[in-house]
Amino acid sequence: MHHSIWAPWRMEYILRAKSGDCFLCALLASDDDRENLVLKRGPLAAIIMNRYPYNGGHLMVIPNRHLAKFEELTSDEHIAISTDTQTAIHILKTVMKPDGFNLGYNLGSAAGAGLKEHLHQHIVPRWEGDTNFMPVVGETHVMPQSLLALYDQLKPHFDHCDPTH
């Protein structure tokens, strides 16, 4: 059986006018981490919440350097992104207790990249039955938690995580 994730809030992202500026570089340049949903900054990469999530707890790990091509990542950037991914998975398991994860990159428009100019890895927590029947039977859509409430729940874990793990 094929399941899809219902995420109508992504339409705001899909339909919004493109400013031409890289919004990931802009949020990295800003110092308002809560407003920009930045959970962790490192010398080479950062962990952010996806403002237009496919599912609750949808995070992205991004290189600090503006680049589009996966093959242009340095070895150190690969290690930083991988380490940050491990940290994010550990924290999401602790806080949200998902049954699994989807991890990956969408490279290029043909692969579904909404932002193809700045490489980013998706971390999407999944739960058994997370494509529930509520939208079908009741025209009711459940968004369990606001982004900022979840940010406030996750952020202390990222603030106190072991930087060597």
Image (cartoon, rainbow, N blue to C red):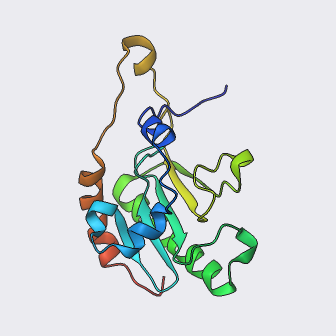
Up/down of 55 relative to 131, above or below: below
- Residue nearer the viewer, 84 or 165: 84
Which quadrant does the N terminus fall into? top right
In the shown orientation, is residue 104 left or right of residue 37?
right
Name the residue at 45% across, 20% down. Answer: 133
Up/down of 5 relative to 152, above or below: above
- In percent of width and height, residue 165 lies at 48, 82
Q: In terms of image quadrants, where is residue 105? A: bottom right
Name the residue at 66% across, 67% down. Answer: 68
- In percent of width and height, residue 60 lies at 50, 61
Q: In terms of image quadrants, where is residue 73? A: bottom right
Up/down of 93 relative to 15, above or below: below
Q: In terms of image quadrants, where is residue 107? A: bottom right
In the shown orientation, is residue 142 left or right of residue 5?
left
Number of numbered discs overlaid on the protein picture? 0
- In percent of width and height, residue 24 lies at 47, 65
Name the residue at 31% across, 38% down. Answer: 144
Name the residue at 40% across, 51% down. Answer: 51
**Residue farthest to the top, as pictured:** 137
Up/down of 116 relative to 10, above or below: below
- Residue nearer the viewer, 25 or 92: 25
